[in-house]
Amino acid sequence: MNIVSIIIPVINEENTITKTLKILKLNKNIEVIVVDGGSQDNTVQLVKDMGVKIIHSKQPGRAVQMNQGSLLATGNILLFLHSDTILPQDYYSLIINILSDLKVVGGAFELKIDLPQFSLRLIEKLVNWRSHFLGLPYGDQAIFVRTSVFQEMGGFANLPIMEDFEFIQKLKKYGKIAIVPAKVITSGRRWQKLGVVKTTLINQGIILGYYLGVSPIILARWYRRK
């Protein structure tokens, strides 16, 4: 039996975590591990009220939290899910089907953003094109990987930003990355807060800076200021 361990890093996500968790409890072949990075709101209590396993990270940071969750995971497949991202109803069977190809070591889903702007439809198309043709999904697309491969890789690099990008680049060396032909729905709050154009320019600037060798610590400080 294939078991999917879903690891969700959180910090102050009381407005999103309940909706995200509801769909995950529909499948008995999964385990859910929420890793809290020091929430000051009602996130932890909401998770406990739903009967979901929650652990507390020694320090905040998505990479650290996801790695810590993976240490407690018992599944032979790991799925790293952002707290504001909703998986499709049949996510389990889709993942199992994709990984039935032994050449595939991991993958992710296509992306849909939960805001109506036409400009975001263009963003979705570009993201999904990049994912399919370049094999470069990002963390908000619910990255999954065989546990044995994740362990061999040593998990996520302890970076304050771009940990998903670096992980996928490294994962490519182990085998094929597949994109599930179904969409996760992720929150558009980033685009809503700063606007589509500004958010896109910031994201691309971070990627360019990473390629140019700018320290992830500096990139993270710049990103948070923006």
Image (cartoon, rainbow, N blue to C red):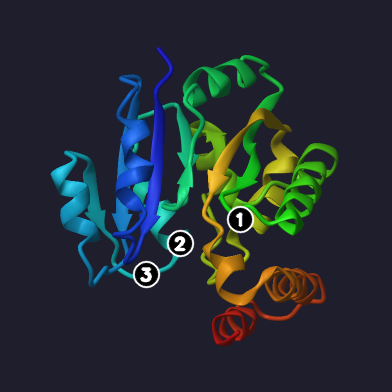
- Circle on res. 60: 3
Q: Earlier in the sequence, mark 2 or mark 1?
A: 2
Task: Give the camera-side residue of 115 and 222.
Answer: 115
| Amino acid at circle 2 | Arg
Q: Return the mark for residue 62.
A: 2
Q: Tell me what residue is drawn at x 55 percent, y 37 percent.
A: 144
Q: Which residue is mark 1?
A: 164
Label 2, label 1: how far apart the Cα atoms are: 9 Å
State how far apart marks 3 and 2 are (Cα).
Answer: 7 Å
Q: Where is residue 57 drawn, in percent x and y?
A: 29, 62
In the rendered image, the vertical position of residue 167 relative to residue 50, given as above or below: below
Question: Residue 42: which quarter of the image?
Answer: bottom left
Looking at the rendered structure, the secondary structure element under dot 2 is: helix
Q: Is residue 26 above or below residue 208?
A: above
**What residue sits 71% from the left and 76% below the top?**
198
Instruction: State if disc 1 and disc 2 touch (CB < 8 Å).
Output: no
